[in-house]
Amino acid sequence: RSAGGLLEVRLEAALGKHEVAGREATTLGYNGGVPGPTLRLRPGDTLRVELVNRLDRVTNLHVHGLHVSPEGNGDNVFVAVEPGRAHRYEYRLPDNHPPGAYWYHPHHHGTVADQVFGGLYGAIIVEDDEELRVDRERVMVVSDITLDSGGSLVSPSTMEQMMGREGELVLVNGAAKPDLKGRSGERERWRIINACTARYLALRLPEQRARVVGRDVGRLPRDTALDDVVLAPGNRLDLVVDLSEGGSELTAMPVDRGGMMGQMMGGGPRPGGSGPVTLARLSVSASGNRAVGEIPAGPAVRDLRDDDVDGRRSITFQMGMGGMMGGGDSPMSFTFDGEEFDADRIDQQVGMDTVEEWTIGNDSPMDHPFHLHVWPMQLLEVDGRELSEPVWLDVVNVPARSQVKVRVAFEDFGGRTVYHCHILDHEDRGMMGTVLAS
Ligand code: C2O
Ligand code: CU
Ligand code: CU
């Protein structure tokens, strides 16, 4: 399709029999599959989605990372689609929309973790203008889920939800350890989406040349090593893999993302405590092809400078005791600056066409991935360490007892939207705030 095109899709969310991890399971899914269909767009395109709710509870749809207007029926969080109803969304991508891998998932506050964990997610690819030349592209949606012996979804305990639930099975496009086949000398492009509810992914692909050419938003100015990047929930990776004969396994190494008050809460499951997990097996046959050359440098990347900054503010992740005393079912509260999400409150008011520098603090003993809708964030500094090159993300991990700095250009669209923790159990418990650009 040419730019300025229209993509119309119907997404039907339902609980049903789906093939998951190689067997029939009863999960959620869009259009009868896990994940849902991959949507491919170009900058300047319009995406129309008719979301049909065949669930027994409210849902809605969010297009994660897309730089589209939050106004009208565009944003997600404030739209509730009742069971048996349908809702039409329309998103117009600006002509200069950054390419990359994005994704869609439900966003109805209080149920997001259950619905995503249950199987509701899918990929959105915004194509490059000047494509990297590759022999094969793979879109790999990584998710996790827990199923009982009958193939039904298992609900996590309260403790697991407070930690952020991690499923027992880690899936790639709904499959457990799929076999990937390639030929030596070929170049592949892997778009990896971390659709896990809370699991962090430190990926490795030993014995193969794998270079990161893009993260959430657009391309990187220079490719970087796979080992240098950890995908928090919601993050994506644009990976170039130059295949050499033999085998490999795409592996997720354990990530220590902290715990609850030093495990004083009874020492529930410790994230990252388990060993490496194999996500996929790769076998590469001999082809006689010569290896491909260097990876071409990406296009110039925007760099917001100190003197572009019109205002500064700070926002801090906090976990506190006492939800239980307030009558909640949780012994912990999950907030920004002590406040749980309130859809009727405006937490951050920003001026249109201004650049802000946000210091995002974390006063808690766990890492939290900070996600802002609509406007991408340029990551400047993590735990006092400055980045040497501009990197644009829509989910930025904020390490425990630490802080990060980002810059955001509030441009192109005004309106009201949200930022939140992308450990979706935390978001559901209140770790979300609203931002109004006007
Ligand atoms: Cu991927 Cu507001 O979420
Ligand atoms: Cu989002
Ligand atoms: Cu969190």
Image (cartoon, helix red, strand yellow):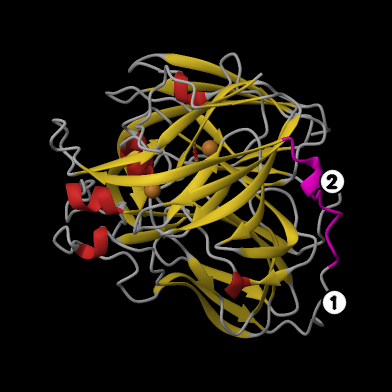
Magenta span: predominant SS is: loop
**Residue 31 in view (yes/no):** no
Which residue is painted at 49% across and 40% down in the image? 36
Q: Amino acid at mark 1?
A: Gly
Q: What x and y, as percent, mark residue 201?
A: 47, 64
- Near-viewer residue (146 or 438): 438
Disc 1 Cβ-to-ligand 1 distance below 8 Å: no
Q: Which residues are the magenta region? A: 296-310
Query: Label 2 amino acid?
Result: Asp
Q: Residue at the location (20% across, 37% down)?
A: 323
How many residues crowd around disc 1 within 10 Å: few (fewer than 14), some, or many (20 or more)? few
What residue is disc 2 on?
Answer: 129
Where is residue 177 drawn, in percent x and y? 42, 67
308 is within the stretch colored magenta: yes
Residue in the picture at 56% in, 54% down: 404
Q: How many marks?
A: 2
- In this rendering, is residue 420 above or below 300? above
Q: Quadrant of residue 270?
A: bottom left
Badge 2, how many Cα within 10 Å: few under 14, some, many 20+? Answer: few
